[in-house]
Each structure stands twice: as C-alpha cells, then as structure tokens.
Image (tube, rainbow, N blue to C red):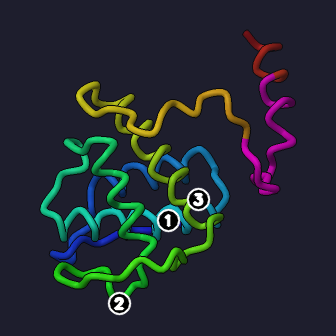
Amino acid sequence: MSYTVLGSDLLPIGPVDDFLSHLTARRSSPNTVRGYAHDLANFFAWLDQRGRDFRMLTLEQLGEFFEWLRKPPPTRVPGVFVLPTGESALETSTLVRKRAALGSFYLFHSRRDTSIPALLGDPAGRRPTGRHVPLLAHTQSCVVGWLWLWV
C-alpha cells in the first residue's frame, strides 16, 4: 500500500512521494508510512502558508513549525493568534513521531542532494522501535545463505 500527499495545487508533492516510496520499498510498517504521510502533509501545508521551500529552511524556522503544530488546528492559519495556555493541541508522542518523520525525510533527501541539510541530525544507528516485522522477513537470512552458496 502506498500513500500520496497532495499540495495546495492538488498535485502530488514530488519529494514526499519519493520519500514515501522509499519507505515502502524498504518495507517499513504500513502504519509508519501512513503516519509519516500525514506528518509531511502538515509540514508542507505549513511551508505553503509561509511561502517557504523545505530545501532552504533553518533549524529555527523548523522550530516555528513545531510551535504551529502545538496550536489547535482551526487556528493554524495566518492572522490568527492564540494566547499561550501552556497546553499543546498534540500529545508529546505525536510531536515525537512528527519529529522522527521530518528527521527521516531530511536525512533521505540530504543523502540524495548534498545541498539539503539533514536538519534534525543523523539518526544512523537507531534501531526500529516498533513491533512490525515485514512478511517473510525470516527468510532473508536463508536467501542470503542460498545466494552465498552459488557465488
């Protein structure tokens, strides 16, 4: 199963499509792919509101995105101000997932284009934390062993 994120012009957002295809090809959990698609849809909606390009963001500007996420959804439009209450519209676990989605997205694109910074750091060495195991994952070592016999 794959997901497509549409921009304000109702066309697929190419960099997001490339990233989600990559996640699907590496057999990430379908729930992860779906969640990351929603997270990146939020991110590109914010970029569109601000007239910004993801390739040119600074870490401080990315922080503005997370502040925007903490607002209730109806108030995430230009010209609407929310008094600080100390409460976020999203749970901390959701914000952590959105950060992971953006970190993976930027890492993927920074490896393809050196002009794009890996803004949220390189999570290399991090192990998956979910319980999803791709179908037939148990056969990978058998296939590798079988190929080794024929080399």
Side (left or right) of 85 relative to 15: right
Side (left or right) of 83 relative to 135: left
The residue shown at (19%, 42%) is 56
Is 51 included in the stretch rendered in magenta?
no
Write down the residue under mark 3: 97
The residue shown at (35%, 61%) is 65
Q: Nearer the viewer, residue 121 or 30?
A: 121
Magenta region: 128-144
Q: Earlier in the sequence, mark 2 or mark 3?
A: 2
Q: Nearer the viewer, residue 31 or 147?
A: 31
Q: Earlier in the sequence, mark 2 or mark 1?
A: 1
Q: Nearer the viewer, residue 91 or 20?
A: 91
Amino acid at the residue labelled 2: Pro
Identify the secondary structure beneath mark 3.
Answer: helix
Per the model, the C-alpha gap separating discs 3 and 1 is 19 Å
Asked if the residues shown at circle 2 and circle 3 are in contact, with their CB atoms under 8 angstroms apart, the answer is: no
The crowd level at tag 1 (other Cα within 10 Å; few <14, some 14-19, many 20+) is few
Write down the residue under mark 2: 74
- Indicate which disc residue 2 carries: 1
Q: Position of residue 71 (x, y in %)?
A: 41, 78
Q: Position of residue 17 (x, y in %)?
A: 36, 57
Amino acid at the residue labelled 3: Arg
Amino acid at the residue labelled 1: Ser
Side (left or right) of 116 relative to 149: left
Asked if the residues shown at circle 2 and circle 1 are in contact, with their CB atoms under 8 angstroms apart, the answer is: no
